[in-house]
Image: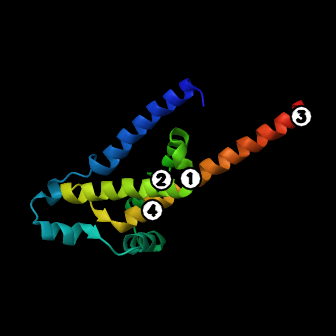
């Protein structure tokens, strides 16, 4: 990869990281709502450690024809699914080591564990295992799209090299 392309990629990645941090730690996730609660109350009201509890609730709301507004469940599911999707492009392109799926996945799990823990400690949003699941699924899809793109580009280069010969 040429240096100019890599530099541009680093700049765009930096912008993405700023947006990611804003969306997960700052933004609308003000700690003011939780600030009057004791730690126990905060944990009881904002921590979900039951896999698929929130996801199934949101899917039920979406599929239930009586719900007036599906904006909240659709937004929550969609945003959590696409939040780490760009990592599938940035990480393997910027770090050769992260072209290995296990290394890539481990890195994303570590990043998310850190973000969710910071949210818990700072009371900025909720600590939700379902957010974690959706974020990781989005990261995996992003990696698979990157991998497919690399294979398509590699295949088309091989075909063009054969026609030149």
Which numbered circle lies on residue 100?
1
| Residue position marked by numbered label 3 in the rendering | 163
Q: Nearer the viewer, mark 4 or mark 1?
A: 1
Q: Give x and y (percent) for residue 52.
A: 41, 73
Residue 148 left/right relative to 103: right
Q: Give x and y (percent) for residue 3.
A: 55, 25
Crowding at mark 4 (Cα within 10 Å: few <14, some 14-19, many 20+) = many
| Residue position marked by numbered label 2 in the rendering | 82
| Residue position marked by numbered label 4 in the rendering | 134
- Are the residues tagged 1 and 3 within 8 Å (C-beta)? no
Which numbered circle lies on residue 153?
none
Rounded to the nearest angstrom, the CA distance separating label 1 from label 2 is: 21 Å
- Are the residues tagged 4 and 2 within 8 Å (C-beta)? no
- Circle nearer the N terminus (1, 3): 1
- Residue at (31% x, 55% y) in the render: 114
At numbered mark 2, what does the secondary structure look like: helix, strand or loop?
Answer: helix
Query: What is the quadrant of the C terminus in the image?
Result: top right
At numbered mark 1, what does the secondary structure look like: helix, strand or loop?
Answer: loop
Rounded to the nearest angstrom, the CA distance separating label 3 from label 4 is: 43 Å
Rounded to the nearest angstrom, the CA distance separating label 4 from label 1 is: 21 Å
- Are the residues tagged 4 and 1 within 8 Å (C-beta)? no
């Amino acid at each position: 990869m040429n240096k100019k392309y890599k530099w541009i990629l680093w700049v765009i990645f930096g912008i993405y990281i700023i947006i990611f941090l804003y969306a997960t730690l700052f933004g609308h996730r003000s700690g003011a709502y939780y600030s009057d609660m004791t730690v126990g109350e905060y944990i009881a009201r904002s921590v979900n450690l039951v896999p698929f509890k929130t996801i199934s609730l949101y899917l039920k709301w979406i599929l239930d024809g009586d719900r007036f507004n599906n904006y909240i469940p659709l937004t929550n599911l969609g945003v959590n699914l696409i939040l780490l999707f760009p990592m599938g492009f940035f990480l393997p392109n910027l770090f050769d080591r992260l072209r290995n799926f296990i290394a890539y996945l481990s890195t994303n799990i570590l990043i998310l564990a850190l973000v969710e823990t910071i949210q818990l400690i700072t009371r900025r949003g909720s600590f939700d295992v379902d957010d974690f699941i959706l974020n990781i699924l989005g990261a995996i899809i992003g990696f698979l799209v990157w991998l497919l793109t690399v294979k398509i580009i590699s295949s088309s280069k091989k075909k063009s090299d054969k026609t030149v010969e």
